[in-house]
Image (cartoon, rainbow, N blue to C red):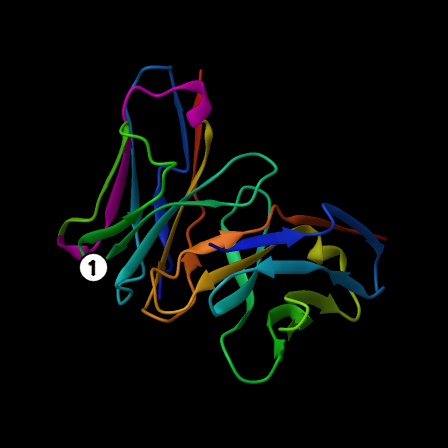
């Protein structure tokens, strides 16, 4: 079984500041890793994914994440945030080759202030 | 690619009534998933179809819940004898095998 821990439930930052949203996972099998963003009253939009290969993955809207196998982490970063980045961010894992169902963390609410 | 479509967007019903939600996946995706999201939580897996076959169900899916995907296209999720605890956002996602899941905007269910 897999589990995901998002270490911060809320992260307030000022516009144009850098941000890091932390994610740690636990799994007994190889996994895929994902970050999704959710705006109010909407579904989830895929930001980026790690399937294999380079441990630094780049996604949409200037976000990137780094897979660290030894620390079982997949932290999300953006060097300069905008007001429009205010949203809920979810880290998720799925097993490889099975149902590939997603196991989500509880989410991190990112609030970007002017 | 028109995306994953869910209907209705909102459903308000009285406790004890039956409700049915519909999900239309991206047409070339053979995998379809249902999740439930309660306030302040991440989505939780309910069930998964590959084509028309329902291959996995979560323990969260009590016997009041049933899901179908006839002909491997759209899917329906029915909840019978709704309870207060069923109030949540119900999300549908689809994917090709080995590909990322694409989500619809969800159906928000409110039980009075």
Residue at the (49%, 67%) spot, across then down: A31
- Residue B8 drawn at (x, y percent): 36, 37
Give residue B46's quadrant in the image: top left
Residue at the (59%, 84%) spot, across then down: A54
**Horizontal placement of A44 versus A12: left or right?**
left
Segment tinted magenta in the rendering: B71-86
Give residue A85's quadrant in the image: bottom right
- Residue B80 drawn at (x, y percent): 27, 24
According to the picture, the residue beneath numbered tag 1 turns out to be B51
Is residue A84 inside the magenta stretch? no
Seen from this angle, which residue lies furthest front? A28
Mark 1 belongs to which subunit?
B
Give whichever of B35, A96 is nearer the camera: A96
- Residue A41 drawn at (x, y percent): 54, 41
Give whichever of A58, B60 is nearer the camera: B60
> Residue A89, can we see it?
no
Task: Please give the count of numbered marks on the rendered protein.
Answer: 1
Residue B20 sits above or below residue A12 on the image: above
Which element is circle 1 on? Answer: loop
Give whichever of B20, A94 is nearer the camera: A94
- Residue B41 drawn at (x, y percent): 58, 40
């Amino acid at each position: 079984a897999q589990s995901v821990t998002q270490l911060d439930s809320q992260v307030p930052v000022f516009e144009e500041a850098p941000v890091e949203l932390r994610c740690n996972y636990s799994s007994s099998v190889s996994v895929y890793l994902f970050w999704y963003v959710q705006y109010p009253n909407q579904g989830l939009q895929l930001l980026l994914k790690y399937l294999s290969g380079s441990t630094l993955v780049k996604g949409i809207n200037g976000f990137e994440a780094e897979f660290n196998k030894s620390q079982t982490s997949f932290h999300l970063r953006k060097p300069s945030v905008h007001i429009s980045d205010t949203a809920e961010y979810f880290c998720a894992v799925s097993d490889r080759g099975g149902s590939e169902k997603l196991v989500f963390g509880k989410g991190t609410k990112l609030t970007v202030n002017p | 690619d028109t995306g994953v479509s869910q209907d209705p967007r909102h459903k308000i019903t009285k406790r004890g009534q039956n409700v049915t939600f519909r999900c239309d996946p991206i047409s070339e995706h053979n995998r379809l998933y249902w999740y439930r999201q309660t306030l302040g939580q991440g989505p939780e897996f309910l069930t998964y179809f590959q084509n028309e076959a329902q291959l996995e169900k979560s323990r969260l899916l009590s016997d009041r819940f049933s899901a179908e995907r006839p002909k491997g296209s759209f899917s329906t999720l029915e909840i019978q004898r709704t309870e207060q605890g069923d109030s949540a956002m119900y999300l549908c996602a689809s994917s090709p095998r080995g590909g990322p899941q694409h989500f619809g905007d969800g159906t928000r269910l409110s039980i009075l």
